[in-house]
Amino acid sequence: MSEVRTAPDDVRLIEARIAEVVGASDPIVSRYVAEVVGSGGKRLRPRLVVEFGRMFSAPDFDHVLDCAAACELLHTATLIHDDVIDQAEFRRGAPTLSRTYGNELAVTVGDYLLARLFAHLAACEDARPLRLVLRSSQRLGLGAVTETTNRDNFAMTEDEYQNIIRLKTAELFSVCCELGAILGNASAEQAGVARAFGEHFGVAFQMADDLLDVLASSADTGKPAFLDVREGRITLPIIHAVKRLGAEAVGLVKAVRETDSNAAEQALAEKLRECGSPAYVAERIQAEMDVALTALDRLPGPPETHDAVRWMCDAVGTMVARMQG
C-alpha cells in the first residue's frame, strides 16, 4: 500500500496511471487510443475520485488511481461515441476521431476502451469498483438513448430534461464521488452523501455546459457554438424560452438549424437574453450547487480536500458569471 499523495501531484499521477492502462493496449489500436486519451481535458472526474478517496483516508492510493483512470476512460469512450452520433468534427479544439478516421474505426476504438477499462478493474482484488462502474455505464447508455429519442421535442418539460442530464452526465460524477468514498471504507450513509454531492454537481455542470452552447464562442469551448441546437438537443435555455415565447422561440431555433448563419445564431441568443433564459438557468445552476455544497459539508476529511472540491464548484460558478457578462 502507498500513502496518499499531496494535491499538486494529483493530475500528474492520474495522467501517468491513464497512460499505464492504455499503454497495455494491443499495438493495432494503441495509436488511436493514445491519440484520443491524450487530447486533454480537465480530468474533473478522476480528480473527484482522488479527492473523495483522500477525504475518507483511503488506505491504498494506487487502487484509488486505478479507479480514477478507469472513470476517465469511461468518460472518454462515451465522448467518442457521442461524437459519432452527433457527427461532430471537433472536440476540445481538435478534430474528432470520427472525423479523422471515420465512424467505424471511432466506434470500435470507443468499444475497445470500454473493454480495456473493465478488464483493468476486473484484475483488481476489490470487486466493488467494477460493480459500480458497470452500473454507471448502463445508466450512461440509458441517458444517451433517452436524449436521442427526445431530439426536437419542444414539448419537453424541465423535469424530463433533468432526468436526461442526471443519467448522461451527473451519473458519472456521482459514481466518482461514491467510489472514492467507498475506497476509504465510508459508511453506507456517507457514501450516499458523497454520491448526492456528485449528482447535484453533475447536474449543475451540465446546465452550465448547455448555457455555454448558446452564449459562448467556439474559441471559448473548442467546439462550434450552438452545436446542441443544431443537433436537436432541447436544453434548459431552450425549454425556458419556449415556455416564455412559444412558437417564436421554436422558429428561432429552427432558423439556426436550417440556415446555419451567424445572424440566426445572434437572433436566438438575443431573444434568449431578452426573455431571461440565461438568468433563469444561472439560478438553477446555483440552486443545484448549493445542494451539492450542503452535502459536502456533511462529510469528514481534512480541510484541503474540501477546499479542492469547492474549487471545482467555484470554477463552474465563475464560468456562468463570465457568460452572463
Image: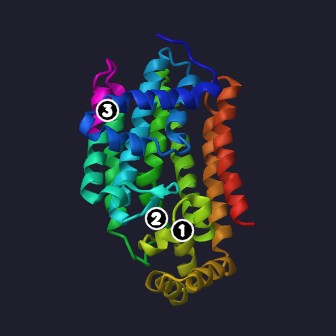
Crowd class of label 2 (few under 14; some 14 to 19; many from 20; radius 10 Å): some
Quarter containing the C terminus: bottom right
Residue 91: say if magenta. no
Dominant secondary structure, magenta: helix
x and y percent of residue 84 in the render? 33, 60
Q: Amino acid at mark 3?
A: Arg
Q: Which mark is residue 161?
A: 2
Tag 3–tag 1 contact (CB < 8 Å): no
Give SS at disc 1: helix
Residue placed furthest toward the top: 1
Mark with earlier residue (2, 1): 2
120 magenta-colored: yes
* Identity, as a three-letter code, of the amino acid under mark 1: Leu
Q: In the rendered structure, which disc, 3 or 2, sits on the residue that comes first in sequence?
A: 3
Is 121 or 147 nearer to us in this picture?
Answer: 121
Q: Give the magenta-colored segment's residue range.
A: 114-129
Name the residue: 42% across, 31% down: 19
Element marked by disc 2: helix
Residue 236 is labelled as 1
Residue 259: tell me if it is visible: yes
**Nearest to N terminus: mark 3 or mark 1:** 3
